[in-house]
Image (tube, rainbow, N blue to C red):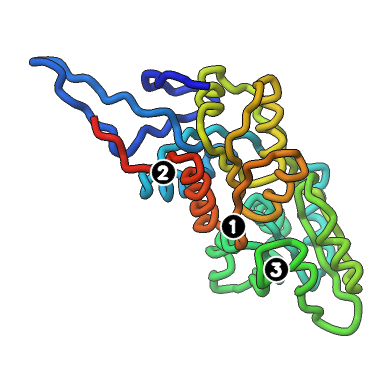
Amino acid sequence: MAFSSPAPFSPPSGTFRPHPAGRLRAAAPGRVVACSPPPPDVVVTRERGKNAKLIAALEKHNIHSLELPLIKHVEGPDTDRLSDILRDDKFDWIIITSPEAAAVFLQGWKAAGSPKVRVAVVGAGTARVFDEVSQSDDRSLEVAFSPSKAMGKILASELPKSSENTCKVLYPASAKAGHEIQDGLSERGFDVMRLNTYTTVPVEDVEPLTLNLAISAPVVAVASPSALRAWLKLISKVDNWNNSIACIGETTGSAAKKLGLKSIYYPTTPGLEGWVESILEALRVHGQLKEAPKC
């Protein structure tokens, strides 16, 4: 399926990032013509405002992106309970598994008066959300543990118990998150309270021209099973779409397999660097990894 390269545009549902090598050239005296950007190499699909680091990392490899947020975060059923529970109860550990969970938790924690808490995180990106607070003078929030591999099931198997007695854990999570963390911790004797503090919903108002560009890209980069499901829903009426999915990590990669996708790439260690390498590998297979075109 071939698509012609459009003129620059700013659709409400997606943002085209022109090739970094794109520039203006003179066509005739007194006239300047812009080089047309080629179709996108990769579609980046995190919620709006969270794709900049990936786009910048790809631009270093002359990879240009179409930003098409597939999901957005909204309040969960337990959002309002979080601050009350933090104010009234004490926990040995707070389990935080994503940057969004961290941001939502910080709002509730501050509303509760910033009580002293000890946090276990999954992933360096999640830990960075806490940097400013954890380095403050009062040290009321301590990021004290991360697992040897950035996966929820590994955290559940490695989280230290503070004593032989029951260890209380608060797990603020997405309503769509699986149960492997709480089940794994419960099997080890932890007392786990899960709060569904946020959830994800698909972005549905995708402009047709943006969707056509996205379908033409050889690689779609996704960071969650929710984004995968949103993408499959968007292309449900497209015949024989068989381009590549580049996942941020094994959890999303496994979900892609279960959803029936075939051309799947993901790093053994979740994170931005590995994600970029997976995207590059997918582009190599498609024969799309090349030098920046010249006007």
Which numbered tag is attached to residue 289? 2
Q: Position of residue 243 (x, y in %)?
A: 58, 35
Q: Earlier in the sequence, mark 3 or mark 2?
A: 3
Amino acid type assigned to the residue bearing label 1 in the image: Pro
Cα separation, mark 3 vs mark 2, equals: 38 Å
Depth check, front residue: 247 or 72: 247
Query: Counting other residues with Cα less than 10 Å from the Cα at mark 2, is it few (<14), some (14-19), or many (20 or more)?
Result: some
Disc 3: which residue: 120
8 horizontally vs 131: left or right: left
Amino acid type assigned to the residue bearing label 2 in the image: Leu
Disc 1: which residue: 267
209 horizontally vs 294: left or right: right
Residue at 37% x, 32% y is 18
Amino acid type assigned to the residue bearing label 3 in the image: Ala
Quadrant in the rendering for residue 268 = bottom right
Q: Earlier in the sequence, mark 3 or mark 1?
A: 3
Depth check, front residue: 277 or 87: 277
SS state under label 3: strand
Residue at 54% x, 69% y is 136
| Rendered view: 54 above or below 125 | above
Q: Quadrant of the C terminus?
A: top left
Q: Position of residue 82 (x, y in %)?
A: 78, 53
SS state under label 2: loop
Q: Earlier in the sequence, mark 1 or mark 2?
A: 1
Cα separation, mark 3 vs mark 1, equals: 22 Å
One can see residue 116 in this view = no
Query: Counting other residues with Cα less than 10 Å from the Cα at mark 1, is it few (<14), some (14-19), or many (20 or more)?
Result: many
231 horizontally vs 290: left or right: right
